[in-house]
Amino acid sequence: MDSTNQFRYSEYISRYVFLIPLIFCTLPFSSCITQKNVEYLQDEDKGIKSFTEARYEEYRLKPNDELYIQISSIDEAAASIFNNSTSPQSFSVGAIQPYGASLASYSVDKDGFVQLPVIGNIFVKDKTIPQVIMMVKDSLTNILSQPIVNIKLVNRYVSVLGEVRNPGHFTYSQEKISLYDALGYAGDITDYGNRNEVLLMRNENGKTIRINLDLTSSDILTSKYYFLKPNDLIYVKPLRKKTWGMREFPFAITLSAISTAILLYTVVK
């Protein structure tokens, strides 16, 4: 390399070399997580607002559902034949696991029937729990004196995956739970979870549907998807910033690149 070209190359390096550390130093800060990224229900109006409670559609039974059925009457001996020996007091409906449910409850078969002692088969597919209670009670009118029927859906669970602190499969006992309840079970969304893009996957009429939800908007409080149904799955997408977030930023590589650039500049100079 002649002296003229060497001088020009050196001048070019000296003119722009300062940009190298500047670029690497600003990269992590350009991908920081802001307060807006981690807030729910972001409304400009900070005053008190009221919302009509989201409509909750009662769950309709499907094949493979597990039902806890307890029947009581004035004649306890006659009523005892309807109750599984392990079902009345030996387990908590809310805490029972799927395998335990199959041992201590009645299953809805593939055709939508549940089989009870003495009564026989009852078609329960697409029926709500209150409807099934009335059906069973009517069937017992001529068998028991003043029958009392209690039915609970045992397999109430939701799955929460993605950018949450404790992803998993969660069983619940209450009649209905909201999106925020389910996220609470999973330890809340992490700082790198995208609250603008939360996916809800639900099986309806034999088809799996996918719904995109925005948890930063207060409109979610009135959405028909605010309350979950048994077997729903929630997936929280990660933010794109996660790839170059402060916690994952390759500082060692950055410092090495800066050192190399300075060394190159010194040698050429």
Image (cartoon, rainbow, N blue to C red):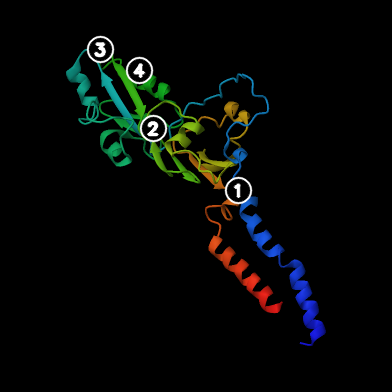
Question: Circle 3: is it few (<14), some (14-19), or many (20+) Cα within 10 Å?
Answer: some
Residue drawn at x 58%, y 64% is: 255
Residue 155 disc label: none
Q: CA distance from mark 1 to mark 2?
A: 36 Å
- At label 1, the amino acid type is Cys
Question: Residue 184's spot in the image, x, y percent?
Answer: 45, 34
Q: Is residue 161 visible?
A: yes
Badge 2, how many Cα within 10 Å: few under 14, some, many 20+? some
Q: Which residue is mark 3?
A: 145
Counting from the top left corner in percent of width and height, residue 95 is at: 31, 33
The reply to whether callout 3 and callout 4 are in contact (CB within 8 Å) is no
Residue type, mark 4 in image: Asp
Q: In percent of the image, x 22 and y 12: which residue is there?
A: 74
Q: What residue would you read off at disc 2?
A: 172
**Residue 195 appears in which quarter of the rendering?**
top right
Element class at badge 4:
helix
Q: Earlier in the sequence, mark 2 or mark 4?
A: 4
